[in-house]
Amino acid sequence: MPGVARPDGIFARVSNALSEDLHGLASTTPAPAELADLEQLLAGAFRPLAGFLGPLDAAAVDAGGRLRDGTPWPSPVLLTVPEALAGEKRIILQDPETVPLAVLDVTEAWSDPSAPAGHFRLAGTLTALREPSYGAFRRLRRRPPAPGAETPAVLAVTTREPLHRARLGQIKQTAERLGLPVLVLALLSGAHEQELVRALLAVQRDLPEGSEIVTVNLAPRADALRDQALAAHVAAAYGATHLLSDAPLTEVPLTVVAPEPWAYDTEHEVWRPLARIAEQRARAELTADELGGLLDRGEAVPEWFTPPAVAAELRRARPPRHERGVTVFFTGLSGSGKSTVARALGDALIEGGERTVSLLDGDVVRQMLSSGLTFSKADRDLNIRRIGFVAAEITRHGGLAICAPIAPYAATRAEVRRMVEAVGDFVLIHVATPLEECERRDRKGLYAKARAGLIPEFTGISDPYETPSDAELVIDTTGRSVSECVDEVVKHLTGGGWLRSQPA
C-alpha cells in the first residue's frame, strides 16, 4: 500500500534541499474531489490508507469494500492525470493556484475504463510539502490526533446538511444516555460550504455542553452508504469512539449508535421520541422535496421544523428560483438558430427588467475570451469550459447567463452543468434543427467549405455532434419565427419559477 512521508511538523514548508530536488518535475492540479482526498491522506484522516490506490486495491474496494489485504475500506481513493504524465516517476501535486502541496513518487500508472478519455490513474508514495490554504472558518479546521494518541471517548455526528430540531433532539438524547461529549464533523464539498458552517454554528448552543464543531474537506461519494461509511472512518481518525447514524453501517472502526425515532408532537408543540406521542399527533420532518419546494417558492420554513437562524442560512443557500442564479445553455449545430434565439431571449428579458442578463454567445466569446484558440477538439473543449466558468460566476452572484456555443460533446456539457449547479441552476436547451436545414441557411458558407474539405473537424460534417440526452427543453427552429421560439423558452423558464411572469 502506498505510504506518506511527512516532513517535520507534517505540513512543514519545503526545505531548500527539497525545493532544489523539485526543480524540473512535472506538475498537475488534481480535480477538486481528488484534492480533497489528497488533503485527508496527508492529514492522516484516511487511516489506514496512506496514498492513492493502485488497480488491485481499487478493484477489491469496488467489489467488496475491502483492500486486497482484507482491510475494510468503503470507497476507492484515486488520482487521475493526463495521459502525457503517465510515464513520469515523480510529480508535483498542486492546488488551483499552482502552489505545490505534495510530491508523488509513482509506483503504478494504470489505464482505468472509468477514467476520462485520455487520462490515467497513478498510485505511489506521497511527500507532504505544505498545508493547504484555508478560507473562511479556518479556526474550525484541525488535523486528526496522531496515531496512538490518548483521546477521550466521544460521540461523532457527521453531516453535509444543517441540523434541524429533530436531529438536535436525537443528539442530546444519545449523548446524555452514553455520557459522551459530541464532535460534529461538517463535511464540506465546495457547494454552499459557508451556509452549512453558519447553520451549524447557529445551533451550537442547542448541542450538549462542550460540543465541538470541526470542518473537514471531504468529497461526497456517489453511493450514499459508501459516503457515510467513509465519513465513519474519518470520524474514527478524529478520535471518535461512537457515531450517531441511521445508516446500516458495518465494518467501520467505531461503534455505530442508531438514534431513537423522533417526531413532532402537534398537541404539545415539541419534538420528542416517537414512542411517547399518540399516533394521530405525530408529525414527521419535512422531506427534502417539501423543504426544497418551500425554498424554491420563497415561502417561510416553519419554526417547528428548524430554528429561524438555520432557516435563514437555508434561504441564503437556496434562494427562491426567481432570485436564484441560472444559466440557460443553448447547444446545437452551426446555423441551427441558437445564437439568434439566445440574443432575442436576452433582449426580451432585459426589456422585462426582471433579471440581470449576460449573453455569452459562441462567436463573441471566441473573439474576447478565447482568442488564440484553434478549432481542435482540445481547444473547443477549453472554449466551452471557459464559457462555463464565466457562466458559473454570473450564476453564483444571482445573474442569468445565456450561453450559445455549439458545444458538441456531451462530456464537456456535463462538466459545465456540474460547475454551474454547484452554485445555482442550469437549463440545457437543445436547438435540434436538422443538419439539412442548417446547411440550407449557411450564412457564412462554412458547410460548403467543410464539404470541400477546407475546414477540418467541422461539427456535423467531419466531426460528430453528440445529441443531448439531458436537455430540459428541445426546440426546432425550422419554419418557426424567432418570437415563437423565444416564447417557448420563456414559457419553460416561467413554469420552472426562474421568471415570475412572462415579459410583455
Image (cartoon, rainbow, N blue to C red):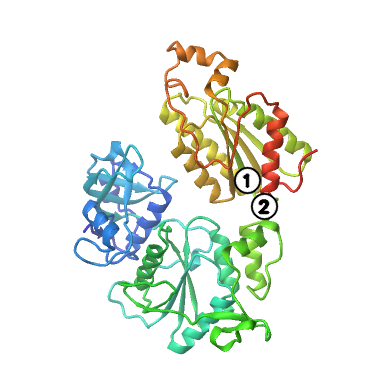
The residue labelled by disc 2 is 321
Of residues 403 and 433, the one nearer the viewer is: 433
Where on the picture, by quarter, is residue 183? Answer: bottom left
Where on the picture, by quarter, is residue 45? Answer: bottom left
Reply above or below: 394 against 44: above
State whether residue 207 appears in this view. Answer: no
User: Distance between the Cα atoms at labels 2 and 1?
Assistant: 9 Å
**Does residue 150 appear left or right of residue 427 in this picture?**
left
Residue 483: % across, % down: 73, 30
Lower sequence index among marks 2 and 1: 2
Reply above or below: 228 against 129: below
Mark 2 residue element: loop
Residue 401: % across, % down: 63, 40
The count of marks equals 2
- Residue at 49 percent of width and 12 percent of height: 449
Of residues 173 and 142, the one nearer the viewer is: 173
**Does residue 47 appear left or right of residue 458 in this picture?**
left
Of residues 212 and 471, the one nearer the viewer is: 471
Q: Amino acid at mark 2?
A: Arg
Q: Residues within 10 Å of mark 2 (few under 14, many from 20)?
A: many
The label shown at residue 326 is 1
Q: Amino acid at mark 1?
A: Val
**Does residue 96 appear left or right of residue 438 in this picture?**
left
Pointer 2 and pointer 1: residues touching (CB < 8 Å)?
yes
Residue, far right: 504
Residue 360: % across, % down: 61, 33
Q: Residues within 10 Å of mark 1 (few under 14, many from 20)?
A: many
Mark 1 residue element: strand
Placement of the N terminus among the 4 image quadrants? bottom left
